[in-house]
């Protein structure tokens, strides 16, 4: 894991309160990378990432899901609308909670969704409240990732699981240059740390979960930043953000001006992007770590 000091929860919250409209205008309702197989539109690529994670995780139709870091509700609404899931979305941002709730209501999905302004690191749910935990590009922002997975595993019913898409630090060993690149990304994109895929596998196992697959998606998602960089320049948004720097706040400025930083980190191998799925074993004995029936599948797609 590569850590960066100087990020606070309130900075992350403020960032999403301020930047959500910008994300919507620049990219769409999903605040996550696209997944390209060919030359699809960015909108389709975003949907393909959701569908990839759905297929990898095997979430059954009608499952009850907690969407951690739900943004504007892109995934939650997709799961409720196309997969008949009952979804609880949590986000640090009140503005995102309202946006997601309004969108779901407008799509007739109010009975299958609820959105809460909650911190994933402190929110309390009763044991076995959900079948699945779904989280796309949120755990990067968490301060104590192992503790989060230990608590979240308790929210799941045996036989359920975890479905994650994550910005990662590249595999160890890390060169000084890799560490420098990752720390700059953490600073600009408000991540207290980025774990490696091996770190995540350890944290999930320590929480009593069985790791199912780890798919390195890096080559298929990097186009996201080429498109964002070109859009922000072409539309004049870069200039707008610079001009109104004071009003938008320093963190917002850093993010919007550093798309190349993350692109270069992916290209150099300092960072990776993966989906990881894990399962909560059926029996208490297995949950305690006595049985490991799944051998992790590690692959690129
Ligand atoms: C990059 S966005 C991803 C949003 C959404 N998953 C999507 O794919 O569209 C990160 C999300 O994580 C949320 N987040 C960050 N830290 C959080 C925390 N401690 N608790 C709850 N949500 C958090 C932010 O509010 C934001 O909604």
Image: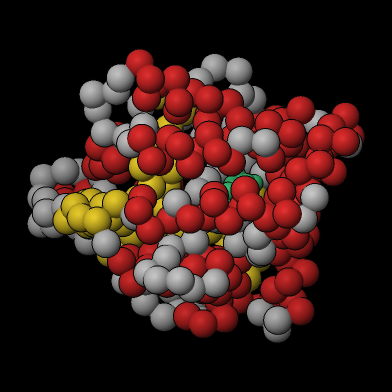
Q: Is residue 249 left or right of residue 46?
A: right
Q: What residue do we see at 43% from left, 63% from top?
A: 35
Is 206 or 262 nearer to us in this picture?
A: 262
Q: Does residue 197 appear to the left or right of 14 in the view shown?
A: left
Q: Nearer the viewer, residue 155 or 112?
A: 112
**Looking at the image, which residue sits at the far front?**
234
Left or right: where does residue 52 sit relative to residue 258?
left
Front residue of this view, candidates 120 and 138: 138
User: Quadrant location of residue 175?
Assistant: top left
How far across and how far down the image is residue 149, in percent? 39, 41
Tell me which residue sits at (42%, 47%) in the image: 166
Quadrant containing the N terminus in the rendered view: top left
Q: The C terminus lies in which quarter of the figure?
A: bottom left
Left or right: where does residue 174 sit relative to residue 74?
left
Res 119 visible: yes
Residue 93, percent from left and from top: 72, 46
> Exactly how many numbered labels are in the figure?
0
Give the residue drawn at x 45%, y 51%: 222
Vertical comparison of 170 with 156: above or below = above
In the rendered image, is residue 3 in sight? Answer: no
Decide: is 58 above or below 267: below
Q: Residue at x 70, y 83 (%)?
A: 108
The x and y percentages for residue 147 are 41, 33
Image coordinates for residue 290, horizontal then vertical, percent: 11, 45
Instruction: Examine the rendered structure and indicate whether residue 251 appears above or below residue 276.
Output: above
């Amino acid at each position: 894991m590569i850590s960066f000091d100087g990020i606070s929860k309130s900075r992350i919250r403020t960032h999403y309160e301020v930047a959500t409209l910008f994300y919507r205008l620049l990219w769409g309702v999903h605040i996550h990378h696209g997944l390209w197989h060919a030359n699809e539109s960015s909108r389709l690529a975003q949907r393909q990432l959701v569908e990839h994670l759905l297929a990898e995780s095997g979430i059954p139709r009608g499952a009850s899901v907690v969407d951690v870091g739900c943004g504007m509700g892109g995934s939650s609404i997709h799961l409720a609308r196309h997969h008949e899931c009952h979804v609880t979305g949590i986000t640090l941002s009140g503005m995102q909670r309202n946006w997601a709730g309004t969108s779901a209501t407008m799509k007739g999905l109010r009975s299958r969704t609820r959105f809460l302004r909650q911190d994933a690191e402190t929110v309390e749910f009763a044991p076995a409240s959900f079948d699945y935990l779904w989280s796309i590009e949120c755990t990067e922002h968490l301060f104590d990732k192992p503790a989060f997975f230990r608590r979240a595993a308790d929210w799941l019913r045996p036989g359920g699981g975890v479905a994650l898409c994550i910005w990662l630090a590249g595999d160890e060993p890390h060169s000084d240059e890799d560490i420098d690149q990752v720390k700059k990304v953490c600073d600009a994109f408000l991540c207290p740390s980025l774990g490696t895929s091996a770190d995540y596998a350890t944290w999930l196992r320590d929480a009593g979960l069985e790791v199912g697959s780890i798919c390195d998606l890096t080559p298929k998602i990097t186009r996201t930043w080429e498109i964002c960089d070109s859009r922000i320049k072409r539309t004049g948004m870069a200039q707008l953000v610079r001009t109104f720097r004071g009003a938008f706040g320093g963190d917002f400025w850093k993010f919007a001006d550093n798309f190349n930083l993350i692109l270069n980190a992916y290209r150099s191998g300092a960072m990776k992007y993966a989906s990881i799925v894990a399962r909560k074993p059926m029996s208490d004995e297995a949950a305690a770590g006595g049985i490991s029936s799944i051998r992790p599948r590690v692959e690129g797609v």
